Image (cartoon, rainbow, N blue to C red):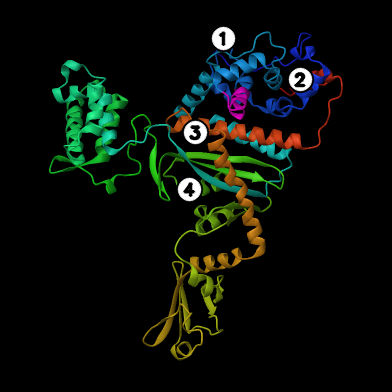
Amino acid sequence: MSFCRNTSQQLSFFDSTSNLTKRELKGLENSWAQTFSTDIFPIIDENRFSVLYSDNPASRPNNPVNVTFGLTMIREMLDLSDDESKNSLMFDIRFQYALHTTSFKEQPISKNSLTNFRAAVQRYYEKTGIDIIKEEIERIAKIFAKQLDINGDKIRMDSLMISSSCKRLSRLEIMYSCVERLVKKLDEDKLSDSLKMYLDKKNYTDVIYRCRNTDINTRLAAVITDAVALVEMNKDTDVVSSQDYINLTRMLDDQTKIVDGKYEIKPSKEISAVSLQNPTDTDATYRKKGKTGHVGYVGNVAETFDGNNSIITHYDLQQNIYHDKDFANDFINKMDIQEEKTTVIVDGAFYSEEIAAKASEKNLEFIPTNLVGRETTIAITEYQKFLLDEKNHTIVKCPMGKSPISCRYQDGMYTAYFHKDTCSLCINRHNCPIKEQKKRFILTVSEKVFHRAALIEKMGSKEYKELAALRAGVEGIPSTMRRRYGIDDKPVRGKSRMTLWFGILVGAMNCKSYIKGKMNAPLKHLGDNMLEVLCFQRASFMIAA
């Protein structure tokens, strides 16, 4: 299938909108389809998706990519299935108007169009590492922000745990499932009696749930023995290239260790977070956040906002062992140097001294709403009172105005010495973090502690609290993704598929935010002869194309 741009944008005399009454045209004008048709559909870059198709002009041309991509966004925006989306495009004038297909004799979407499009994007991502959905959605997001007059000087960031759709398994279930899946792929005649048991569906229930007469370690050892036998039996065959064999050997590496030439089961605390959680989703990892364990992935969103509107301008998805600070680093690396200072409001988990310094190089100011780490009571009450000369790397005075005998700075640490007579008689002695030595008093403190103390003092100001309060808006995104769009229940498994769906969801939410922002703005009415305006809009699009 060769790539061909969609040039069928001109209205015909038999356009479906020509049969609408003035009342119906007014309703169409005031619907979401109006903004999608005039503002969103025309900016979809078809050329970005040309890599998915053949460059042989003799082959059959593709269905219009902008229609397929646009319908993918609308599908998620309205929470529809593929079949519902296809039927809506065929019978709903709003869908046709939004995607500029009102003059088509037949709608250019078939039963598997959306599935094939997503599969093609996924294959290209797995092959090249280039996520063209993400590139297009983030490009469109910048246009949305500009059209909504969001100046971009404030960004807020948040992450969310995303559950894999696979079942959460116990250790025994993981081991059993890996053995069972490979056994079912082999010739039954070549299997030993113990391995043939895995072909019996009842055996799963007996081993996992009903064998109360044997403890869990005995059952684990029995399955491990079968797993090792299965590996040895097939290590010199073509089976080694199958995913089921790879999963089995990975499971053995995760769950066991070799001692004196024998496989022994690892203690639970030695099992890595990146160990195989379920053979049906080999990319899912385990992470405990708070008191809850999660199997799956973690998404991150950065939302550019002002007082009225907001758009997700950056996003990412990784295995759930990825830390918030890693997301912050990735965000900074991707950003260009800002002409004006841009404030990035984040949770404390995104913040560190190194991240703040790296961000300042690109004129970004990271504002944490809280801080994570050790208790900072001493830093709040005392360290901030020491007068520090960072340019010359020296401590000038203590909180009581006394200068040190000497001071040195090495590897980010300050060491200052004070007279013993002065410090021992000081009225602030019981609060001071200084320590007594035989001949003098010493203060040893890192530069980070001073910076942290200054930041904590700054966080107590009214202006800082007002700025930090603005971050609350981004916390609604994870909630919306779960409640409205069911991000934890997407029928896909694997990081590449989940990345694709997460991106489509972000794009749909941006479209919805943009339409809402435009519809809440003062409306520019099209007048009575709407068809003339529609023709002008389509003609303008043709010229731009």
- First in sequence: mark 3 or mark 2? 3
Q: Main secondary structure of the magenta part?
A: helix
Task: Name the one closer to the observer, 512 or 425.
Answer: 512
Left or right placement of residue 6 versus residue 241 in this view: right
Disc 3 from disc 1: Cα separation: 30 Å
Residue labelled with disc 4: 326
What type is the residue that disc 3 sits on? Thr
Which circle marks residue 60 in the picture? 1
Q: Are marks 3 and 2 in contact (CB under 8 Å)?
A: no
Residue labelled with disc 2: 538
What type is the residue that disc 4 sits on? Asp
Dot in front, 3 or 1: 3
Dot in front, 4 or 1: 4
Residue at 45% across, 60% down: 373
- First in sequence: mark 3 or mark 1? 1
Q: Residues within 10 Å of mark 4 (few under 14, many from 20)?
A: few
Residue 15 x %, y %: 75, 11
Q: Magenta span has 167?
A: no
Task: Name the one closer to the observer, 77 or 306.
Answer: 77
Residue at 61% across, 40% down: 312
Left or right placement of residue 194 versus residue 87 in this view: left
- Magenta range is 69-80
Residue labelled with disc 3: 499
Circle 2 SS class: helix
Q: Residues within 10 Å of mark 2 (few under 14, many from 20)?
A: some
